Image (cartoon, helix red, strand yellow):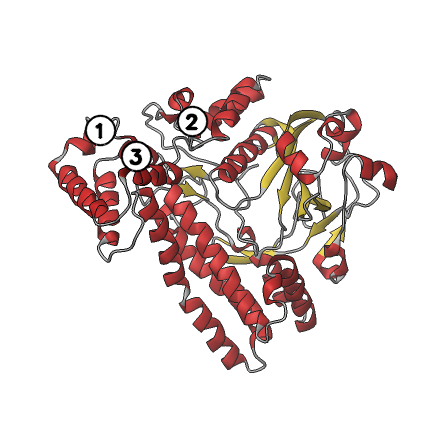
Amino acid sequence: MKDKKESKDIGWNLDNSYLNLPKVFFSKINLNPVSSPQLIILNDTLAKELGLDSNYLKTEEGVKILSGSETIQEGAFIAQAYAGHQFGHFTMLGDGRALLIGEQITPSGKRYDIQLKGSGKTPYSRGGDGRAVLGPMIREYIISEAMYNLKIPTTRSLAVVKTGEHVIRETVKEGAILTRVASSHIRFGTFQYISQWGNKEQLKELADYSIKRHYPYIEDDENKYINFLKEVIKAQASLVSKWQCIGFIHGVMNTDNMTISGETIDYGPCAFMDTYNPDTVFSSIDVYGRYAYKNQPKMLGWNLCRFAESLLPLLDEDQNEAINIAQEAISDYDEIYYNNWISIMRSKLGIFNEEELDKAIIEDLLSMMEKYNEDYTNTFVSLTTKNNMDKGMFISDEFKNWYDSWQERLKRQPNSSEEVNKLMKESNPYVIPRNHRVEEAIEAADKGDLSVMMKLLDVLSRPYDYSNDQDDYTMLPKPSSCPYKTYCGT
């Protein structure tokens, strides 16, 4: 165990404010050391932002900390309790295979949770082994960092460590632990948990803590709990609009995977859409398409209703009035989401100002993309660069008519063609973490070759570059008779 002076010397600056909440919110965790931890990848840039010494984290002692095999004196080392609706069914959950090392205060004064995912059993494991598998941890590392570079609020990945131990899933897999960084791990489900099994005072303490940590500017408001609900609605509406506009499908939009902060969390069965199809589902367990691409905004609305229900005791003493207050706040969600979505979509088409017909222009394009089975990302890249427009949808009379209407629309704004192109390049990524490329990186890493992953991460670190060395990563996967599926067995 490192003493305090040494911990500070290597950058740890932990302040565990979550421990001030009632003990019902968490459980202290004894470590589950692993036999022979090996560092697979460390995010040096993120480590620096956190104020941590990368060189130390790469040492044997550093890797022991990142593998949950050694403590830090100032650390919290807890698992957090929460509940959630999983595919519509409410259940008790909690960090079943993750422990929170603590809250790192960065040199710039920001606070981030440092959590180990796959670190072993906790009181919330529900019979599971508490471990994670190398492939899915690499997957979360790649996609969460891609999301960050795509300017989408997200948890991030500091490191992946191979444990040297085997994990039994459908076959024998290599075990691994991901170090996840988040502005917090407070979820809709955290509030649902205390609403179901706690009392009003504990709910109030959680709400006050969440407001102070994420929305301090409403802390002194007379109706701060109502405003808290409204701020979470705005944050999540903004987030999911970004998902939709980038073609990202989360896959498990359960209430325990919705954060109070408005960050994307849990990259289990997520994926990016290639061919534009609103019905796209990747998760192998989502057999009814509950969390299909087209349903994500609607399911967020549903989740926000469940979050609002958990806050009712704080909204008003009279339950009927509390329900009315919650319903009024939730009723604004559709408009808030739509305004976020159309603003981004206008930018993707180089539109600076607002006209009533913009929605029709956008929806007509999406309808054509679906009809002609066009790739979502590459279609917007083609519109930006005017390249690769000699086949498919682009040579149809339908598109030519649409294109003329779009160009006429652009003429009705004062911005130059250079400004339009600049906005489009800033709004349309040239590369995304294509599913086949992510799988390729995981497969190579499983065989001990990390170069494929490192090259992919380099390309994804600059998704708006429009660089020739990224061209290979814009290519679509080869046709397959089996639709791409992702799995929760991580």
In this rendering, would 145 be left or right of 298? right
Tag 1: amino acid: Met
Tag 2: amino acid: His
In this rendering, would 447 be left or right of 388? right
468, 452: nearer the viewer: 468
SS under mark 2 = helix
Q: Quadrant of the N terminus?
A: top right
In this rendering, would 123 be left or right of 342? right
Q: Quadrant of residue 315?
A: bottom right
The mark tally for this picture is 3
147, 282: nearer the viewer: 147
User: At which x and y percent is residue 427?
Assistant: 38, 40
Asked if one can make out residue 459 in the rendered structure from this viewpoint, the answer is: yes
Task: Return the mark for residue 481.
Answer: none
Q: Quadrant of the C terminus?
A: top right
Per the image, the residue denoted by label 1 is 389
Per the image, the residue denoted by label 2 is 436
SS under mark 1 = loop
Question: Could you tell which of marks 1 and 2 lies nearer the N-terminus?
Answer: 1
Q: Looking at the picture, does residue 58 appear above or below residue 363? A: above
Nearer to us: label 3 or label 2 = 3
SS under mark 3 = helix
- Residue at horizontal 28 percent and vertical 55 percent from the top: 354
User: At which x and y percent is residue 335?
Assistant: 37, 62
Spatial CA span between label 1 and label 2: 24 Å
Per the image, the residue denoted by label 3 is 384
Cβ–Cβ under 8 Å for marks 3 and 1: no
